[in-house]
Structure formats: C-alpha cells, structure tokens
C-alpha cells in the first residue's frame, strides 16, 4: 500500500515514511499525534502501520492544492485508502486543551507543521510533557535551510531534556527521539 500512499502529494520521502511506520509500530499503546496533515501522506503511512483508530492529526487546513483546501483533500485521499483517522482542525500547540479532553494516552508525536523555532519549542514542551514514558517524538524538515533556527530549537530541547536519540543521523530530513527517565541516563 505504500505505493498508493506515495500517490498522495506530499514532501515526505519513501525512507521517511518507512521510518515513521517503524516508529509507530514501536511506540507504546496509545494515540499517535501528527502535527501538520497537509494532504495526508504521512497520516496514511501512520494509519497503515498501526490502524486509523490510533491516529489523530491536527492541522489548521489553510493550504490549497489544485484549488481545493487540504482538509477536504486529505479526507478524500484517506477515505480512498479506506482510512478514517481523527482529523482535528486547529492550531498547534493551541490544540493541547482539545487533546487533554479527547486523547487520554499519547504514545507518539510526529511534528511537521509550522517550522518556526518558537512554535516547535512550544510544541516540544507541550507534547513532550503529555507523552508516555518510552514515547516517541519524530520531527520532519530537520536541517532544512529554509527554516532558520528550527533545527537549533529542536537540538536545544533534546539536549536539555536528555531524551535518547533514535536517529543518530537524520533519515533524509526526519529525526526521532525516545522519552526516557532522567535516572536512566546516569
């Protein structure tokens, strides 16, 4: 089905999608939160890996592609693949309150939304705290020169929190980290 998923217009590569699927399968029980649905390519890959009942995707859905907004596009593309994940129209990290009310256990977060250093710092703080122990955070567009300060904000958060790196080198533009107890690092 990965070939069908690749037919969805998106910016995640085959290698990134395969890694996302591996990470989703390795994540503890609970919901997987995606920040930034776009047209649903990575959403579909996550659904294929763990089932659409575990996937929640948040986007402001303000982008247009071929004259159609990405909320209706992603819904249609996912439905064509037989997938119906929970899509939430909202801004991250402002959606944290909605998540508190609707997502009791968060096991993985994939951040690929607004690539601003302040936004990703807030997202990491907000969702990192909500993630279960041994939960996973993956981030797209690491080391992209189009997003000044984004990589540095990511590095600063994980250096401060001591999470374990799951990707010693980025896979294309994807990096991932595992939430561990601070005592486990000593």
Image (cartoon, rainbow, N blue to C red):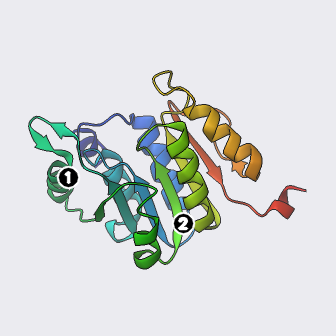
The residue beneath circle 2 is 107
Residue 160 located left or right of residue 170? right
- Seen at 54% across and 37% down, the residue is 117
Query: Can you give x and y, in whole percent of width and height, for residue 83 in the image?
Result: 24, 62
Q: Going from the N terminus, do you reach mark 2 or mark 1 first?
A: 1
| Residue at 16 percent of width and 48 percent of height | 73
In the image, residue 185 lies at what x, y percent? 85, 55
The x, y position of residue 12, in whole percent, is: 38, 36
Q: Quadrant of residue 50?
A: bottom left
Q: Residues within 10 Å of mark 2 (few under 14, many from 20)?
A: many
Q: Is residue 169 visible?
A: yes
At which x and y percent is residue 102? 40, 76
Residue 170 seen in this snapshot: no
Residue underneath mark 1: 71
In which quadrant of the rendered view does residue 11 lie? top left
Front residue of 46 and 74: 74
Q: Is residue 18 above or below residue 143?
A: below
Task: Please tell me whether mark 2 or mark 1 is closer to you in this view.
Answer: 1
Q: Secondary structure at mark 2?
A: strand
Residue at screen point 17% across, 39% down: 64
Q: Nearer the viewer, residue 80 or 94?
A: 94
How far, Cα to Cα, is label 2 from label 1? 24 Å
Above or below 3: residue 86: below
Q: Where's the C terminus, which quadrant?
A: bottom right
Which of 106 and 22 lies nearest the eye of the viewer? Answer: 106
């Amino acid at each position: 089905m990965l070939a069908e998923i690749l037919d969805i217009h998106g910016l995640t590569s085959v290698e990134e999608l395969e890694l996302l699927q591996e990470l989703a399968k390795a994540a503890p029980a609970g919901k997987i939160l995606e920040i930034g649905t776009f047209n649903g390519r990575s959403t579909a890959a996550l659904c294929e890996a763990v089932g659409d009942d575990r996937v929640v995707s948040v986007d402001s859905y303000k982008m247009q592609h071929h004259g159609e907004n990405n909320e209706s596009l992603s819904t249609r593309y996912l439905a064509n693949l037989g997938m119906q994940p929970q899509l939430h129209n909202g801004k991250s990290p402002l959606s944290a309150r909605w998540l508190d009310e609707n997502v009791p256990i968060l096991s993985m977060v994939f951040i690929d939304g607004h690539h601003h250093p302040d936004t990703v710092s807030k997202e990491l703080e907000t969702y990192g705290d909500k993630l279960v122990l041994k939960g996973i955070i993956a981030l797209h567009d690491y080391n992209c020169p189009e997003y000044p300060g984004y990589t540095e904000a990511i590095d600063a958060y994980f250096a401060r929190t001591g999470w374990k790196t799951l990707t010693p080198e980025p896979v294309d533009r994807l990096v991932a980290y595992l939430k561990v107890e601070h005592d486990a690092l000593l």
